[in-house]
Amino acid sequence: MTDLFSKFDGLIEQRRALLSTGVTDPFNLVMEKVISPTVAVCNGRETILLGTYNYMGMTFDPDVIAAGKQALDEFGSGTTGSRVLNGTYAGHRAVEDALKDFYGMDHAMVFSTGYQANLGIISTMAGKGDYIVLDIDSHASIWDGCKMGDAEVVPFKHNDIEAMEKRLKRIPEGAGKLVVLEGVYSMLGDIAPLKEMIAVAKAHGAMVLVDEAHSMGFIGPNGRGVAEDQGVLDQVDFVIGTFSKSVGTVGGFCVSNHPKFEILRLVCRPYVFTASLPPSVVHTASTSIRKLMHAADKRAHLWENSKTLHAGLTQRGFKLGTATPQSAIISVIMPDLERGAMMWEALLHEGLYVNLARPPATPAGMTLLRCSLCAAHSAEQVQTIIGMFERAGKAVGII
């Protein structure tokens, strides 16, 4: 009889071999106590956090925490219902209003996670007979949305404008077309040439969805993301985002100016058939989003942190995912998974937590140590981090 687990045997053996070397399981680390956006206790010792996506450091903002506590007292712990039934509270409307104000758009729809936002909008907008043209390095939630919607999926080489145009030219006349892009790609931390890509998409009559999960709050004059930074936000049909990065809680959303957008609340299955976010979450999110509208100083400091870390690691001989700092993500390319895990553990012993990212989640089969900077990291912490990387890199033989 076929064992349904047998398809995972290769991964099971790879994991067994990795753990047999005595390395700490890099995918099962426990945060025993979280002290601040940048420090936690891991394995009994204080550790600098450099792998949390907490880009704007909002998780411990006093106003955000107070809003969540008040909502718990006034509205209870959960809605126990879908948004289209009993699950829309005052806080859900308030967070959608905050998103509309933040992006300057007419419509906002909040999902229970960012994953569900991509799954829901993509699968609902592009179905059988439609075409989705997307970057090969797109997030898993984008690919899963494509699969669920049953559209024809046409991938193109990462950030290649010419390849994207070739795919669009081959789509039959009159077919529905959706181009899906990301502002910042989370593995290498590189940005997309959205201005040029959106111009090509519009020239071929396609709608455009941009996932700004890793740029919201940080990139652009108002923190609206790469599309704003490149001056093309008004040409994007759907912006997808998340509350689990810069906003500092959990949830997902889509904002749009399309006049027919509101019908999606009745036809989008991952919105209709799941429980809505708890009141405490939506109140923390709306408070955080409104504060991010006035966070220019934090954005400037985060850019300084990114430039400093990128330069410091480059100067010490590490190979990075981008030639210049493009976002709050800086990825350090490892020779292979085994040495990547050794380097990850050496950094943990130094008192630094980063993400170990491995295939198939990574592009081109790379093993990466992914660093996510935070606006709450001090300049001194960034210098300490560079020293930790240098010592660990020499100990493991990476540099």
Image (tube, rainbow, N blue to C red):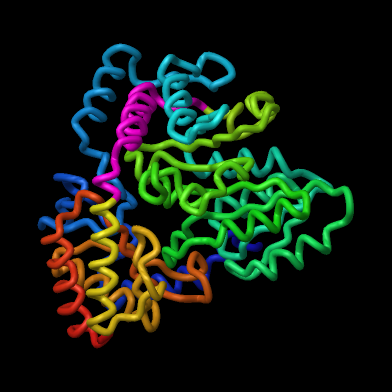
Magenta segment, principal secondary structure?
helix
**Left-right relation of 307 to 279:** left
Of 179 and 394, which appears nearest the observer? 179
Where's residue 273, x and y in %? 60, 28
**Left-right relation of 112 to 263:** left
Which image quadrant: the N terminus? bottom right
**Left-right relation of 332 to 96:** left
Q: At 48% from the left edge and 35% from the top edge, which residue is drawn? A: 103
Q: At 68% from the left edge and 27% from the top edge, which residue is drawn? A: 259
Is 158 placed above or below 81 here?
below
Where's residue 276, x and y in %? 48, 25
Of 191 and 202, which appears nearest the observer? 202
Q: Quadrant of residue 269?
A: top right
Which image quadrant: the C terminus? bottom left
Which residues, given as a range, are shown in magenta?
Answer: 275-299
Is 175 placed above or below 338 here?
above
Q: At 36% from the left edge and 49% from the top edge, which residue is drawn? A: 218
Q: At 29% from the left edge and 57% from the top edge, which residue is drawn? A: 303
Q: Farthest residue toward the right?
A: 173
Of 222 and 147, which appears nearest the observer? 222
Where's residue 178, x and y in %? 71, 49
Where's residue 206, x and y in %? 74, 49
